[in-house]
Amino acid sequence: MFIRAARHEDVPDIAHICATGWRDATADIVADENVEATVETRFETSRLEREVRRADDMHGWVVAVEDGRVVAAGGGGLTGTKSGEVFALHVRPDARGSGAGTALLRTITAQHVVGGAREQWASCLDGDEETLAFYRARGFDVTGRTRHDALPTESLQLVREI
């Protein structure tokens, strides 16, 4: 497996991986119609194409590729002079536990550190125990809760020093 910057041709895989991951993360937490509205907005291919095209060394999408197939996608960016954020991180269901998510997080973290960040933020839905466990195992702590911007639920705000 190797990690690289996302390319235009990766956009359909990124959209599929993120939509599937989002649906899995929200199962039993929010109603399906709210989930689909978020999928259509955040993981719509023309939006992802713009984001991939605008990427630079500190912001953008990265993918994990194994046997010629994109198995995970993630994106982040600098959000302040000393902070970065993981905006999305999803792994194909059949590749979970393979280390792809951890490898993507390491790459996004390296981008943040090179950009001057000393702390890294992420979030997950309150009730998404799998994602919360992933981030906690990598040193993130819950610092608060906020209303999710597109769903009738709360998000947990996570942070760690990097």
Image (cartoon, helix red, strand yellow):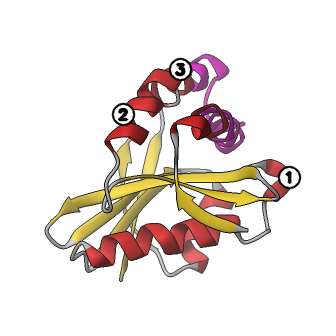
Q: As displayed, is residue 46 above or below residue 140?
A: above
Q: Secondary structure at mark 3?
A: helix
Disc 1 and disc 2 in contact, CB within 8 angstroms? no
Q: Which residues are magenta?
A: 15-37
- The mark nearer the N terminus, 3 or 1, is 3
| 117 relative to 75 in the view: left or right | left
Counting from the top left corner in percent of width and height, residue 146 is at: 34, 47
From the image, tell me which residue sits under label 1. 94
- Residue situated furthest right in the rendering: 94
- The mark nearer the N terminus, 1 or 2, is 1
Residue at point 61%, 31% (across, down): 30
Q: Amino acid at mark 2?
A: Asp
Which quadrant would the N terminus be assigned to in this image? bottom right
Q: As displayed, is residue 35 above or below residue 130?
A: above
How many residues crowd mark 1 within 10 Å: few (<14), some (14–19), many (20+)? few
- The mark nearer the N terminus, 2 or 3, is 3
Q: Distance between the Cα atoms at labels 3 and 1? A: 23 Å
Q: Is residue 19 magenta?
A: yes
| 74 relative to 70 in the view: left or right | left
Residue at point 77%, 53% (across, down): 68
How many residues crowd mark 2 within 10 Å: few (<14), some (14–19), many (20+)? few
From the image, tell me which residue sits under label 2. 149
On the image, which quarter does residue 123 sit in?
A: bottom left
Q: Amino acid at mark 3?
A: Glu
The label shown at residue 40 is 3
